[in-house]
Image (cartoon, helix red, strand yellow):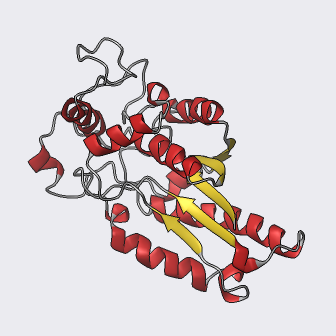
Amino acid sequence: MKKIGIILLSGGLDSTTVAAYALKQEYTLTGLTFHYGQKHNCEIRSARKIAAVLGLRHEVVDISFYRKLAWYSALTSSSDFVIPQLRDEARMSKDIPITYVPLRNTFFLTLAAAYLESRALELIEKENANPAEIKASIFIAANAVDYSGYPDCRPEFYEQAARVLFLGSKLGVQYHNHINIETPIISMTKAEIIKMALELKSPLKYTWSCYEGGRTPCGKCDSCILRARGFLEAGCPDPALPRTKLKPC
């Protein structure tokens, strides 16, 4: 079985963990990072470093035009919307936050599938590989537990997306092979993800989770709060914040 994979590598804690997980599953893995017109480039910088440390082939793709389409978000129109700060869990889980980018994961999956299918078809049609001996998988660090509220982070979304990719691809229709969507951390808490990352020796010290740009994370946005709570519950210091007082795990 030839295992080829794409990891949607954002530069954050979750996608870095999933990248290390996919490598352990012995995939020939490519990291795919999108510049989609987001508020800052800190995560792209982090993704480049993480890919280098993990030894991944890495593609940074400029799709910055997307911000003109998915403009109703604090991550793509920072001058029009304020990123929520210092919210508790009840407020985070009340509704879908303004940091949601319209149909972002749907778009990202389509782009990743196009890249992955191209490689699978090359193996089959140019290198004479047996379609039944190819496993093509997209790895995405979606998580439905820690109060993100995003509709495109739910298991039912990915179940339907996988069916769409099968029905809409040559790999599926002609060669009867699936583009798998792997979501290994979708039902895990942040603390569980952190423990998994440490077991996999993921390079967490290079990750960036904050919705704000700058020299250091803001510590106030939802992403920073959830990350901090996760490390606290895991009983470990955040390696990206070396001044933490917790002892190493």
Quick one: which residue is furthest to the left in this view?
90
| Identity of the residue drawn at 62% across and 53% down | 26
In the rendered structure, the answer to whether residue 144 lies left or right of residue 115 reads: left
In the rendered structure, the answer to whether residue 217 lies left or right of residue 178 reads: left
| Identity of the residue drawn at 36% across and 33% down | 210
Placement of 58 over or under 163, stated as above or below:
above
* Pick the front one: 28 or 102: 28
| Identity of the residue drawn at 13% across and 56% down | 94
Figure quadrant of residue 243: top left
Query: What is the x, y in percent for residue 234?
Result: 24, 34
In the rendered structure, the answer to whether residue 177 lies left or right of residue 19 reads: right
* Pick the front one: 153 or 204: 204
Query: What is the x, y in percent for residue 60?
Result: 66, 43
Indicate the quadrant containing the N terminus: top left, top right, bottom left or bottom right.
bottom right
In the rendered structure, the answer to whether residue 185 lies left or right of residue 45 reads: left
| Identity of the residue drawn at 48% across and 48% down | 18
- In this view of the protein, can residue 80 be seen by the observer? no
Counting the numbered discs, the total is: 0
Placement of 166 over or under 94, stated as above or below:
below
* Pick the front one: 23 or 137: 23
Indicate the quadrant containing the C terminus: top left, top right, bottom left or bottom right.
top left
Query: What is the x, y in percent for residue 199?
Result: 41, 37
- In this view of the protein, can residue 121 be seen by the observer? yes
Query: What is the x, y in percent for residue 227?
Result: 29, 35
Figure quadrant of residue 157: bottom left
